[in-house]
Amino acid sequence: MSEIEIKEIIFIYKSKELHSLSFCELKEFRKYLLLDGDEVLGEKIYSLMEALVREEKVTSKEMLGAAYL
């Protein structure tokens, strides 16, 4: 995957509201951010993912799906 493709994907995710993204979308967004070197936003997304798990808002299927990303 090229750097341009990664930036395009990041742009698409940034255009959405973070709280509207599913656990899997957050995981994928974080992956691309870290590939691009944006650790600050990556950590913020990680915190959101942790909160979803703590609040039991993530199904086992979502957890399994996120593991494949």
Image (cartoon, rainbow, N blue to C red):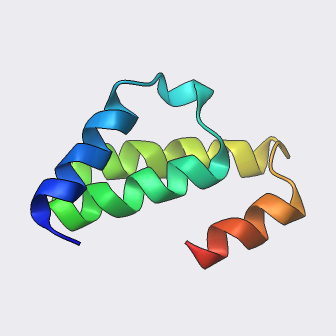
Q: Quadrant of the C terminus?
A: bottom right
The residue closer to the viewer here, 57 or 4, is 4
Residue 36 sits above or below residue 22 on the image? below
Q: Quadrant of the N terminus?
A: bottom left
Give the residue at x 87% y 64%. 60
- Percent across and percent down for residue 63 are 75, 65
In the rendered picture of this protein, how many numbered marks are placed on residues?
A: 0
As drawn, is 57 to the left or to the right of 43?
right
Which picture quadrant has residue 14?
A: top left
Give the residue at x 37% y 51%. 43
Give the residue at x 85% y 64%. 61
Which picture quadrant has residue 36?
A: bottom left
- Percent across and percent down for residue 10 are 28, 44
Give the residue at x 26% y 36%. 11
Residue 38 visible in image: no
- Percent across and percent down for residue 39 are 23, 55
Residue 9 sits above or below residue 19 on the image? below
As drawn, is 61 to the left or to the right of 1?
right
Which residue extends farthest bottom?
Answer: 68
Residue 12 visible in image: yes
- Percent across and percent down for residue 44 are 40, 42
